[in-house]
Image (cartoon, rainbow, N blue to C red):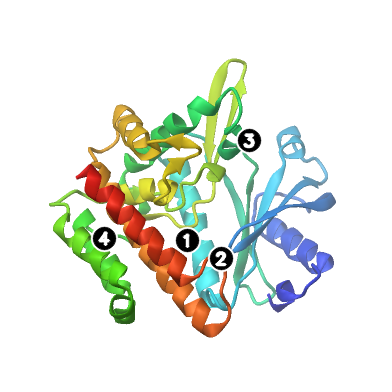
Amino acid sequence: MTRRFQKKTDWHWLRSIVEDSLNASGKFPFSVSIDGKLEWIDRGRYHDNYRFWIVGPELSEAWREKSLLLRIGTQNRRLRSATQAALSIAREAQTLQALQAAEFGFETPELVCLVKSAARQPVGLIEHWVWGMSLQLYKNSIHADRIIPTVAAVAAAVHRLPPGRFGHLTALPDSRTHILRTLESLPAPLFRDYPAAVAARKWILKRLPANRPATVLHGDLLPQNIHCGDSRGEWKTAVIDWEFAEIGDPACDLAIVTRGDRKLMGINNGLRRLVDCYRDAGGIELSLADVRIHELLLLLKRLWDSDQGHHREWAEGHGPAHCAQRVESLLRRAETES
């Protein structure tokens, strides 16, 4: 996998491991190969994404016409190790398989196979391409009013999935445990150096939920991970990128969408609208404070990351002063909602 860190993509290596993995998958009684070139689509935090088609003798029309997506690890040594990357890829593959067996209600990518290096370590996966356009691209379109209800409906459906089918995921028993363990994972110097962090922790501890059961979480339910489109008058939806799925507090999924921003996709009172739509879609009863708790936890984690980046000279994004101000601002807004 070391060649993936070179400035230029080793296309020969990439094609080779993709074709080797496809032919070792047992899905084809004959040898298949990539038709044309791998088309680079985009880069996430941990993956490069490529689109491609395959050819082979007696390949069915369904396989010839269906494009495939390669998600190949771009392992960032500072963010996670090769072992962590391999475990994450294997876990996502299991999640996709579990989703196919569950009654989810929305399209999800169908796993074709894992992609393994010459050392037989998972370095990526291949899945069927899902139809639709990223939900975030509808922001200024005639479908803009669909964005929040669609996210809410997806979140509610995810949280209805039976946790028993997802035994491979990291699991916490209830919302209270989820919150407390996240708080405990934050380092002591954060609360020593930043009064805003102390105030946020105090606010959170005063509002811990009682015994709200844990549910399956998508873990990265941003609009770009929801693909939609109007097909002959029907609004179709697909949900992608299940790498961060886990079992925990359902309010966490909504906080990942809102992230403490004043507006959600340019909409004032976006969090309130999201919570209302989520409830209408059959979601679990959640208050604004339930979601604010996880927004604060996300901002505290970002504050610590910013602090460490500032001191170690690999800073990305805003500095710690800005992040601390965001925590303070969110606390002020949360107090007025209580």
Of 75 and 202, nearer the camera is: 202
Q: Earlier in the sequence, mark 4 or mark 3?
A: 3
Q: Residue at x 28, y 72 (%)?
A: 195
Task: Provide the secondary structure element on which disc 3 rests.
Answer: strand
Q: Earlier in the sequence, mark 2 or mark 1?
A: 1
For residue 262, side relative to residue 64 (left or right):
left
Q: CA distance from mark 4 to mark 3?
A: 33 Å
Q: Residue at x 62, y 61 (%)?
A: 47
Q: Which numbered circle lies on residue 133?
A: 3
Q: Marks 4 and 1: which is nearer the front?
A: 4
For residue 310, side relative to residue 48 (left or right):
left
Mark 4 Cα shell of 10 Å, populated few (<14), some (14-19), many (≥20): some
> Could you tell me the amino acid type at mark 2?
Gly
The answer to whether residue 174 is visible is no
Q: Which numbered circle lies on residue 317?
A: 2
Judging by the rendered image, the residue that carries numbered circle 1 is 91
Above or below for 169 versus 305: above
Quarter of the image containing the C terminus?
Answer: top left
